[in-house]
Image (spheres, rainbow, N blue to C red):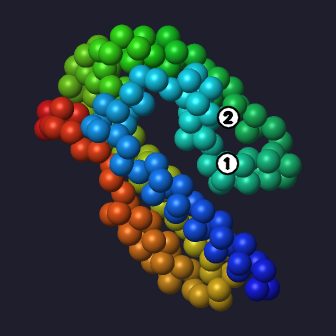
């Protein structure tokens, strides 16, 4: 890689960190964090949802698999569409009336603690597996660019992510995080 490549990557990384530090800590409590103080425009919520569910891995892998095999992965956007309709019908009314702050509070209110705990456990398990894939996928180009081994690259990615999380000021509120 040339000096210009390293410079562009450094500027990009510093810009991302600066943006994160600028916006960090503006929430007073978990309600502000989850509900955006109830003053977010609809288009910001839409882009946030799309950005949350679409990772770089999806953008890279789905077209590649579709090109190599068939259009079976076209079901992914249809699933997104059905999921959004479900969220709009069953979850958004509770958010807008202020009756709930998370999907889990809605599940508990509607179906009980057992359902909330099951959904939380399934989510955390799937999230852990997905995050493992994302860490590994991030370590591959790092290993290629630097010449380090995959295990060393994985450890470096984990250290960077863990250090950035330890510096974040994610709001913790007893109302949301109390043991149930």
Q: Image quadrant for the C terminus?
A: top left
Dot 1: few (<14), some (14–19), or many (≥20) neighbours within 10 Å? few
Mark nearer the N terminus (1 vs 2): 1
**25 relative position to 148: left or right:** left
- Residue at 33%, 63% (x, y): give it: 166
Counting from the top left corner in percent of width and height, residue 86 is at 52, 17
**65 relative position to 150: left or right:** right
Q: Mark 1 to mark 2: distance in Å?
A: 10 Å
- Residue at 25%, 16% (x, y): give it: 109
Counting from the top left corner in percent of width and height, residue 167 is at 35, 63
Mark 2 highlights which residue? 76
Element under disc 2: helix
Q: Are marks 1 and 2 in contact (CB under 8 Å)?
A: yes
- Residue at 41%, 74% (x, y): give it: 159
Rendered image: mark on residue 177: none
Rendered image: mark on residue 58: 1
**80 relative position to 106: left or right:** right
Nearer to me, 142 or 115: 142
- Residue at 60%, 68% (x, y): give it: 13
């Amino acid at each position: 890689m040339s000096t210009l490549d390293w410079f562009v990557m450094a500027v990009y990384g510093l810009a991302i960190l600066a943006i994160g530090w600028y916006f960090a800590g503006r929430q007073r409590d978990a309600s502000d964090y989850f509900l955006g103080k109830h003053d977010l425009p609809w288009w910001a919520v839409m882009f946030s949802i799309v950005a949350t569910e679409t990772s770089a891995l999806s953008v890279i892998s789905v077209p590649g698999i579709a090109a190599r095999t068939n259009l079976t992965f076209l079901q992914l956007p249809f699933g997104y569409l059905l999921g959004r309709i479900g969220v709009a019908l069953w979850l958004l009314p509770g958010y807008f009336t202020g009756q709930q702050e998370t999907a889990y509070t809605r599940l508990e209110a509607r179906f009980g603690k057992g359902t909330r705990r099951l959904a939380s456990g399934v989510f955390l398990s799937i999230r852990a597996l997905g995050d493992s894939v994302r860490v590994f996928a991030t370590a591959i180009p790092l290993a290629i660019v630097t010449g380090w081994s995959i295990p060393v690259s994985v450890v470096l990615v984990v250290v960077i992510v863990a250090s950035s999380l330890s510096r974040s000021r994610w709001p913790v509120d007893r109302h949301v995080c109390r043991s149930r």
